[in-house]
Each structure stands twice: as structure tokens, then as C-alpha cells.
Image (tube, helix red, strand yellow):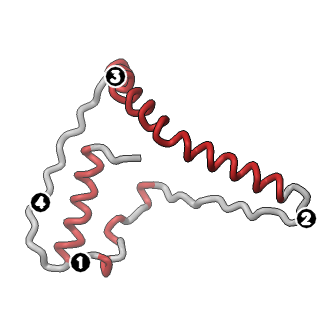
Amino acid sequence: MHPSRYGHQLMAAHFRQLLLKRNWQIAPIQIDKVVVVSKATSIKWMLKNGTPWFLKRSIDLLPAALFLMAAEIVKMSLNRFSKTHADVYYPDFAIQSELKLQEVYEERVS
């Protein structure tokens, strides 16, 4: 997912906090008010802008997706008679409100 304008502004504000800890002089980040639009407006926007983007990306990504599906089918058919079971890992997603964005590994900031 690509962050919205508000998401970019939040990331900039959190990144600014990290840089301030390193004595950088950075002006405060202006976070614009989020404009709430109606569901009808959102649907119209998606049909006008999202559908062409989706179709373009589908054409770009379709060959790669077909290749990956074929590779998985070959892999599954080769391992069909294997006695070993695959490991399944489930991601552990934290609740967004519990995340502490200020605790990013600061040593990576240069």
C-alpha cells in the first residue's frame, strides 16, 4: 500500500523527531486536515483513476504472476508424494496504536 498525503506527513513528522534527537534543525512538519469525502465520491474516484491504473498494472504484472503460479504448480506436483510437511508461518501484526514509531533503529539514519 502506498501512504496517502496524510500518511506521508505523519512519517515525515516521526522522522523529524528522530533527526531532532541528532541535533538537526528542521522546521515543524505541517499536517493538513484530513478531508472526509462521501462514499459516492470515493467510488467515482476509484472508477475514474483506480480502474485504469489497475488494468495497466494487470497487463504489466500478468506474465510474472502466471510464471509464479506455474512454478508453484510444478513445485507442488514434485512434492506431492513427499512425506515432509511445509512450515507455515503467520505474521504477528501489532495493533497500530501499540506501535512506537519513535523507536526506529536510529543508527540507520545518516
Q: With 23 as the anchor, is 66 left or right in this view?
A: right
Residue drawn at x 22%, y 59% as measured from the top left:
13
Mark earlier in primary sequence (2, 3):
3
Mark earlier in primary sequence (2, 4):
4
Give how far apart the Cα atoms at labels 4 and 1 are: 20 Å
The amino acid marked with disc number 4 is Pro
SS at badge 1: loop
Contact (Cβ within 8 Å) of mark 4 with mark 3: no
Q: Which residue is mark 3?
A: 48
Q: Which residue is mark 1?
A: 110
Q: Which residue is mark 2?
A: 83
Residue drawn at x 8%, y 72% as measured from the top left:
25
The amino acid marked with disc number 3 is Lys
Viewer-side label of 3, 1: 3
Residue 51 % position (x, y): 41, 27
Residue drawn at x 90%, y 64% as measured from the top left:
83
